[in-house]
Image (cartoon, grey):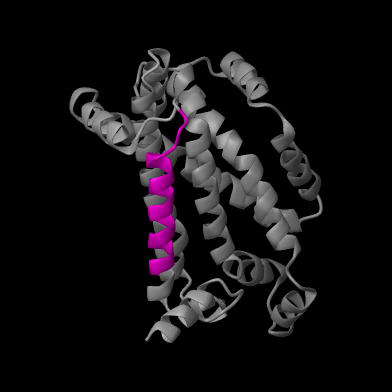
Amino acid sequence: MLKKFVQRFIDVFTPNKDVSKRDVRIAAGVLGLLILLTWQFSTMKFLPKPLETIHALIRLWTEENLAGHMWVSFKLNLHALAITTVISLGLSYLSVVPAVRPLVGVIGTMRFFSLNGYIFFLMQAIGGGYGLKLWLLVISMGVYFVTHMSHEIASIPQTEYDHARTLGMSEWEVILEVVVIGKLDKAIECMGQNAAMGWAVITIAEGLSRSEGGIGALFLNEDKHFNIDAVAAIYLFQFLVSLVQDKFIRVFLKNKICPYIKLMMERR
């Protein structure tokens, strides 16, 4: 029995070893426990303990309307993600057209620009309020979405295009079959990754206009009063919500829309 347990333990740390989901969950549980213990017994004074963070989370939930602020941010994230997905996928799919390809390349280079530059020009063009937050998120996510998705499309082998042409398809039908449908799983994966990018930027965006609330506005208010336990609680709550969203998009949604992906994965 002990020998079998030791072997399973070794298998979990062996690259590309076929292990059961149960063993992976056990390994994840052990890792989570180690992180929690490290957090509890950390000597860093600026880091609040787990119980302090939980108490702050309860206070924020009951007294500061944490759920309401999170709902405001969640809707903003979804709105920005929807706009980003439509625009970015449209540009990425059109990257197969030579006239559009330079524009896609220019948009890809915009990821090197500072957010402060975007904020300045957006404030001049839009002003403040919800529009400023929305389009700051759209730009922040869109430049990475276009870059990633256009690279995925550029990596499609020539044989896939040729195979579609031998079936009598026109060039636009080839694009629909090979590029749009053929890379649908990559589009959903990219959408999930950029949703996470939106959560990373949302504190900055909501800090520019706090009148509508949001998790970013609440975070900055607590940070202003140096409530470190509340700051940690907000970070933890945002992490959990964004993690659930990520799993829904990149696991549940992708498996439902593209079930064939399971057959192509080595580690399942």
The residue furthest front is: 2
Q: Position of residue 160 (x, y in %)?
A: 72, 77
- Which of the 4 image quarters holds residue 185? bottom right
Asked if residue 103 lies left or right of residue 145, the reply is: right
Asked if residue 41 lies left or right of residue 16, the reply is: left
For the point 38% across and 17% down, the residue is 221
In the picture, the quarter occupied by the N terminus is bottom left
Is residue 3 visible from the viewing direction of this image?
yes
For the point 36% across and 19% down, the residue is 227
For the point 75% across and 61% down, the residue is 154
Q: Position of residue 54 (x, y in %)?
A: 27, 36
Nearer-the-camera pick, 60 or 139 = 60
Q: Is residue 38 magenta?
A: yes
Nearer-the-camera pick, 116 or 179 = 116
Look at the image and give the residue range highlighted in magenta. Answer: 25-44
- Above or below — where is 257 with respect to 133? below
The residue furthest left is: 62
- Above or below — where is 12 with respect to 102? below
Is residue 19 visible from the viewing direction of this image?
no
* Helix, strand or loop: magenta stretch: helix
For the point 61% across and 74% down, the residue is 15
Nearer-the-camera pick, 141 or 47 = 47
Q: How many marks?
A: 0
Q: Position of residue 80 (x, y in %)?
A: 48, 38
